[in-house]
Image (cartoon, grey):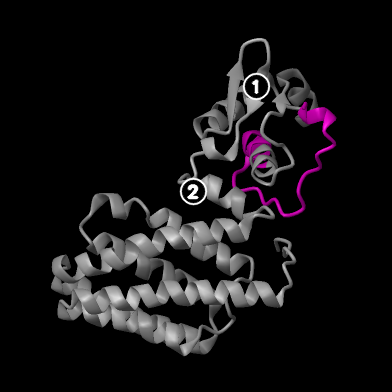
Amino acid sequence: MDLTCSGVATPASTVLAQTGLHGRVLDHLGTAICGGELAAGAVLNIDELVDRYAVSRSVIREVLRVLASMGFIETRRRVGVMIRPATAWNVFDPQVIRWRLASAGRIAQLRSITELRTAVEPHAAWLAAHRVSHDDASDLVGLAAKMWAAGKAGDEGRFLSLDIDFHRRVLRASGNEMFVKLQELVAEVLTGRHHYHLMPRHPHEQALQLHADVAQSIQRGDGDGARRAMVQIMEHAFDEMSSIWDQNHGVVPHQA
């Protein structure tokens, strides 16, 4: 299938994460691939892409280079540039996560990352309880208190920022450099849940208390307590996504 003959329209939900011609083309193609408008096996023609987007061949080649680095495309002899199946994608790339969150499959993406978080963050909290410095532990407790205040006040933007910072700090405090690398993924999924209205306007008091429990357990050096509380946070996230999605009857909300 050729892109210019496929009738693919720019998804209404696409928001340009980057500026300039390169960013415009990359976002369009990336979102179209993640959303399934360009299915595995589709063939992209460079000359037709040049005409479609009114950009130079160098811009198109750079976009294709980036897509190839993400596992989205491959060049085959006598075939051309072909879309690869989702199993080949670099699903840990934050940009791929953004595109998947902008597609109709966002719930599957959120579920996938939350399952990953459930496997990693509880153990990160356990490690943090044994490795965190006194100052960092105190900062984490203070951060949990700020989250509580922002949640109760209904300040969604501030709560999101604090929530991202909280989970980032726990991953860092684990002292495991591979866990730390997951902080961008956590930030993307939390931002995505907020952006697509897949979390309550006012965080539940239980969720606020669980963050405080994680922080206080880490401060006390109680690894088992920190792990249990973090597992409950993940379970609560699953419950929130499921209930809110059911209320929306499976309708995919448009990006603002």
Q: Name the element at disc 1.
A: strand
- In this rendering, does residue 113 appear at all? yes
Tell me: residue 191, above or below residue 200. Answer: above
From this view, report whether residue 25 is shown above or below residue 76. below
Q: Residue at 67% of width from left, 10% of height from top?
A: 78
Q: Which label belongs to residue 178?
A: none
List x then y, in percent, for residue 219: 19, 78
Rendering coords of residue 5 (x, y %): 84, 29
Q: Can the viewer see residue 138 in this picture? A: no
State the residue position of label 2: 94
Residue 112 is a magenta residue:
no
What residue sits 49% from the left and 48% below the top? 94
Name the foreground residue: 51 vs 230: 230
Tell me which label, 1 or 2, sits earlier in the chain.
1
Structural crowding at the residue carrying mark 2, measured as other residues with C-alpha within 10 Å and reported as few (<14), some (14–19) or many (≥20)? some
Disc 1 residue type (three-letter): Val
Q: Is residue 89 above or below residue 207?
A: above
Drawn side of residue 181 relative to residue 17, left or right:
left
Q: Quadrant of residue 223?
A: bottom left
Q: Of the residues shown, which amino acid type is indicated by label 2?
A: Pro
Q: Quadrant of residue 119?
A: bottom left
Q: Which residues are magenta?
A: 1-27
Q: CA distance from mark 1 to mark 2?
A: 23 Å
Disc on res. 81: 1
Nearer the observer, 43 or 212: 43
Q: Residue at x 68, y 28 (%)?
A: 41
**Image position, residue 95 (x, y; %):** 53, 46
Kindly give the residue lying farthest to the top in the view shown. 78
Total labels: the figure holds: 2
The residue at 49%/89% (across/down) is 152
Residue 131, quarter of picture: bottom left
